[in-house]
Amino acid sequence: MGSSFIEYRGYGFWSHDPFIERFAAETAGVIESQVEKQEWEIDLSAHWILQASGVFGGCIHLKLDDFLVSEERRRKLRQIAQSVTEQHAPDDPIHQTGILLLRLLDGQLKTDSSSPLGYMVGRNKPGETKV
């Protein structure tokens, strides 16, 4: 199972590709279901669907810095990501991946690509997300 580094503003986290792909696909689905969408949301959704396709093993790039160029956009994506996260039980890797993404978007995650992987989803006890 491949892993990718999800980065935003110089920090990020590693996660297994299937977890990122599923989270990205579900988030894109929420965006697509909105009646009114801004152009950046349409672009993000299309990009995340492509990233969730399974062809980018070990190289999934959500382009958070490219899409979240304002506080308004960051808050909007955070709101959607939180709703996706909350749809899953705490021991579900999708929930745990979502928690890491929320912490990253909130500026609470200060790990980089060379940090120890003790926080990585799948390496912790069920329901535990360390960082």
Image (tube, grey):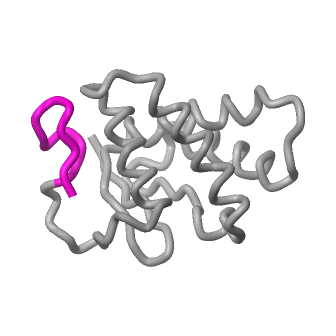
Query: In the rendered image, which quarter is residue 35 located in?
Result: top right
* Above or below, comparing residue 16 to residue 85 in the picture: below
* Above or below, comparing residue 59 to residue 99 in the picture: below
- Image spot of residue 85 (x, y percent): 45, 33
- Image spot of residue 122 (x, y percent): 19, 39
Q: Residue extending furthest bottom?
A: 10
Say which of 49 and 56 sits in front: 49
Query: In the rendered image, which quarter is residue 10 located in?
Result: bottom left
Say which of 95 and 122 sits in front: 95
Q: Quadrant of the C terminus?
A: bottom left
> Magenta span has 128?
yes
The region drawn magenta spans 119-131
Say which of 30 and 15 sits in front: 30
Identify the residue shown where x is 62% and y is 39%: 80
Identify the residue shown where x is 39% and y is 72%: 11
Left or right of 47 in this view: 90: left
* Above or below, comparing residue 36 to residue 12 in the picture: above
Left or right of 36 in this view: 68: left
Most frequent secondary structure within the magenta stretch: loop
Left or right of 100 in this view: 28: right
> Magenta span has 104?
no
Identify the residue shown where x is 67% and y is 30%: 30
Identify the residue shown where x is 56% and y is 46%: 51
- Image spot of residue 90 (x, y percent): 29, 28
Q: Quadrant of the N terminus?
A: top left
* Above or below, comparing residue 18 to residue 120 in the picture: above
- Image spot of residue 36 (x, y percent): 89, 36
Number of disc labels: 0
